[in-house]
Amino acid sequence: MGFETCGPNEAMVVSGCLYGKPRMVCGGRIYFFSCFQQIQRISLNTMTLIISSPMVYTAKGVPISVTGVAQVKVQGQNQEMLASACQQFLGKSEKDIMHIAHETLEGHQRAIMGNMTVEEIYMDRKKFSQHVFEVASSDLVNMGIAVVSYTLKDIQDAEGYLKSLGKARICQVHRDARIGEAEAQRDSGIRQSQAEEQHMKARFTNDTEIAQAQRDFELMKANFDIEVNSKKAQSELAYDLQAAKTKQKIMDEKMQIKVVERSQQIAVQEQEILRREKELEGQVHRPADAEKYRLEKIAEATRNKVVMEAEAEAEAIKLKGEAEAFAIEAKAKAEAEQMAKKADAWKEYKEAAMVDMVLDTLPKVVAEVAAPLAQTKLITMVSGGDAEIGAAKVTGEVVSIVGQLSTVVESMTGMNLAQTVKVAKK
């Protein structure tokens, strides 16, 4: 007598005295009498079966080879199934149980392969595995064996049928891929065009708004500039007008000063003319004549100066009115009287005056003749025989030129300078 135990992966079957039918214990202990009772064990481990079905003709007569993987075990939780398993496999080894289950599964696998086409098996492995699982489970459950799982592991074809299907499928996939790629590119191009269109619309809208804002800004700025420039121009014009008025007043004052100055100068010149005339009247001899001639020249120069100043004053006289015109008229009369007196003096002295003028002009003529020599840096002279050379030659040339002046004066005035000088000395 004693206790017997078993693990969770096995079951004990006690038969013999005291039991009307065998007692089955899964993973536990039991008290038994070794003299009257017998204990047998059966494994509850999961068994892996490789189910190979080579060269099985399918529904359309195409032979293929299929390899499946099944997981089976003796069901210990169900007493009926455990009882059936005990009836079938008690006393047999685990290998024997695996062999029986393998043969059963292979038979059902072949049967299902014969009822399906290669395409169905190849294309829908889950459906094939489900059929095998359902059919095999219905038979093995009567033996107390439960099919835990079944999976189609491999399909082989010695005739190249599957390869042909693969090629067709590959071509189809490639075709679909190309079509899909083309459609994707088309859709991408369309979407890209739409996105670009939206982008351009947004950009144009944005540019339009910016341009409108810029235009509004420029218009407002232009209006502001017009207003500012108008005020500024008014201010500048007012300033320029005031400056012009002030400058005009200053010019008027300056002109008044110049008019007074010119009047005083005219009076001084008139007094000077009167003084020169009195000196001329008191002089009789040649020095007096020369002085008179010089004064006349001075008076003439003064007259020219006064004429020029009068012309300048004419502009002021036009602005100031008839008062300044009267002053110019008086000055013109004085000049006329002076010119008349000069004419009388010329008539009185005649040739003496002309001689004095010529003698007074000769130094200037000689100076003009000698002027080019003063600017000369180098003179190269060629002389032959007994002719003079050097500085004597240059001096002789100048004297010769000056000696010809009397001839020039006689040809221009008809007066023999040498004879006139002799008469004047007598």
Image (cartoon, rainbow, N blue to C red):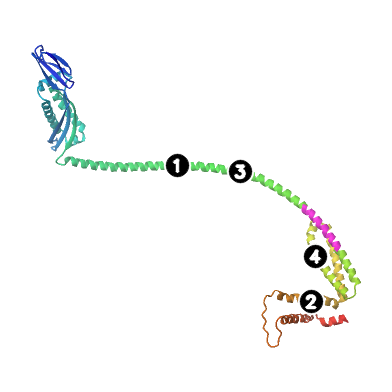
User: Which three-letter amino acid code belongs to the residue tagged 2?
Assistant: Leu
Looking at the image, residue 39 lies above or below residue 248: above
Where residue 11 appears, as percent x and y from the top left, is: 15, 20
Asked whether residue 151 is in view, the answer is yes
Q: Name the residue under label 1.
A: 201
4 and 3 marks in contact (CB < 8 Å): no
Residue labelled with disc 4: 305
Sequence-first disc among 2 and 4: 4
In terms of depth relative to the viewer, which is nearer, 319 or 128?
128
In this rendering, which labeled residue sits more in front, label 1 or label 2? 2
Task: Report the Cα–Cα distance between label 4 and label 3.
Answer: 60 Å
Q: Which of 2 and 377 is in front in this view?
A: 2
x, y (%) of residue 153?
Answer: 18, 34
Q: What residue type is labelled 1?
A: Lys
- N-term mark: 1 or 4: 1
How many C-alpha atoms fall within 10 Å of the one at disc 2: few (<14), some, or many (≥20)? few
**Which tag, 1 or 3, sits closer to the chain's start?**
1
For label 3, the residue is 223
Packing grade of label 3 (10 A; few <14, some 14-19, many >=20) is: few
